[in-house]
Amino acid sequence: MPSHLKLKIRLNLCTAIFFSAWLSACGNQPAPTKPVQPTIPRPAPAQFAQQKNCLACHNATGNMVGPSWQAVSAKYKSDPNATSTLTQKVLNGGQGSFGPAQMPAQANNLTPDEATYLVEWVLKGGQ
């Protein structure tokens, strides 16, 4: 057999062995995972609402300057978009849903995740 054919066979064999080893090694590697973002523990919702001064205008059962959390929960109980609607009202402010009092924007006081955390709690009646 001519030497150039022997060389070609060896190269093809080496290439096949290399790719075979490479593919089998790839199959044994665990799939990459998303990095986990550390979570900062939040206080219980009632305590968090107090820390964020929600109690200046709201409480669980009776209307004050703003509506009670139970009134908000009752009004939005059948609204599938309640969480996002109310989160936007908390962050951007609003008026007219519960009378003439204006809800001041809280975007400087709450992150969107914090607002959602409180809204989800309010939609359960603040319980």
Image: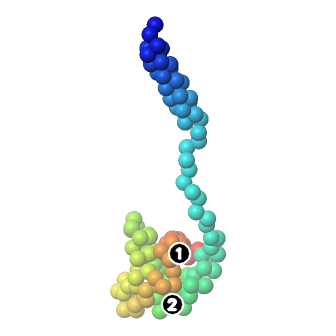
Q: Residue at x 55, y 36 (%)?
A: 26
- As helix, strand or loop, the secondary structure at mark 1 comes to helix
Q: How is the image coloured?
A: rainbow
Q: Which mark is residue 57?
A: 2
Residue 70 position in % (x across, y down): 50, 78
Residue 42 position in % (x across, y down): 62, 73
Q: Residues within 10 Å of mark 1 (few under 14, many from 20)?
A: some
- As helix, strand or loop, the secondary structure at mark 2 comes to loop
Q: Which residue is mark 1?
A: 114
Q: Is residue 80 something one can see in this rendering?
A: yes
Front one among 112 and 50: 112
Looking at this view, name the residue that lies furthest to the front: 3
Q: Residues within 10 Å of mark 2 (few under 14, many from 20)?
A: few
Q: Which amino acid, by three-letter code, is at mark 1? A: Glu
For the C terminus, the image quarter is: bottom right
Q: CA distance from mark 1 to mark 2?
A: 18 Å
Looking at this view, name the residue that lies furthest to the top: 1
Q: Residue at x 51, y 90 (%)?
A: 57
In the image, residue 31 above or below residue 75: above
Q: Which amino acid, by three-letter code, is at mark 2? A: Cys
Between discs 1 and 2, the one toward the N terminus: 2
Between label 1 and label 2, give the one nearer the viewer.
1
Q: Residue at x 50, y 77 (%)?
A: 111
Residue 85 position in % (x across, y down): 39, 73
Residue 46 position in % (x across, y down): 61, 79
In the image, residue 7 above or below residue 46: above
Snapshot quadrant of residue 80: bottom left
Q: Is residue 125 something one can see in this rendering?
A: no
Left or right placement of residue 88 versus residue 27 in this view = left
Q: Residue at x 48, y 22 (%)?
A: 11
